Image: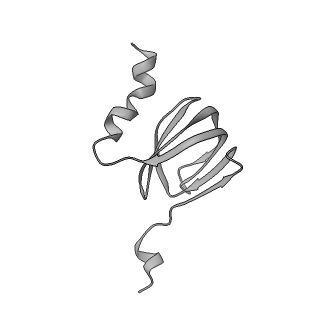
Amino acid sequence: MNDHTKRPRHEIVMINRRSLAISGVKNVESFDSEEFLLETDGGFLTIRGQNLHMKNLSLETGEVAIEGLVHEMAYLEQGQAGDRSRGFFGKLFK
């Protein structure tokens, strides 16, 4: 059996630190103009930057497009995502 049929595909394409196309997205946990937290087939992914905004979202196909200046991308270890997902609403309702 082919390995591609067993495991969902997760890809990230970045162009000039200004445009991201991400596939294999299961859920958008939180987002604002400085940080996105996405649940992907590869784990929880955090994207930090300036003037970030979602250009396109299709959870049916698992694709997200983000524009803005990207400073950092990192996968979170298990247990870290819970604190991050409260970030946007935690800031909003403090």
Colour treatment of the image? one colour
Question: What residue is shown at x 50% (from left), y 66% (from top)?
Answer: 9
Q: Quadrant of the C terminus?
A: top left
Q: How many marks?
A: 0
Image coords of residue 32 (percent x, y): 55, 29
Question: What residue is shown at x 58% (from left), y 54% (from top)?
Answer: 22
Judge by depth and name the residue closer to the eye, 50 or 85.
50
Farthest-out residue, front: 71
Question: What residue is shown at x 53% (from left), y 50% (from top)?
Answer: 59
Is 85 placed above or below 24 here? above
Farthest-out residue, left: 79
Q: Quadrant of residue 53?
A: top right
Image coords of residue 86 (percent x, y): 38, 29
Image coords of residue 62 (percent x, y): 53, 55
Image coords of residue 73 (percent x, y): 51, 46
Judge by depth and name the residue closer to the eye, 9 or 19.
19
Left or right relative to 54: residue 75? left
Farthest-out residue, bottom: 1
Farthest-out residue, top: 94
Judge by depth and name the residue closer to the eye, 84 or 1.
84
Is 18 placed above or below 31 here? below
Q: Quadrant of the N terminus?
A: bottom left
Question: What residue is shown at x 70% (from left), y 43% (from top)?
Answer: 18
Is 61 placed above or below 76 here? below
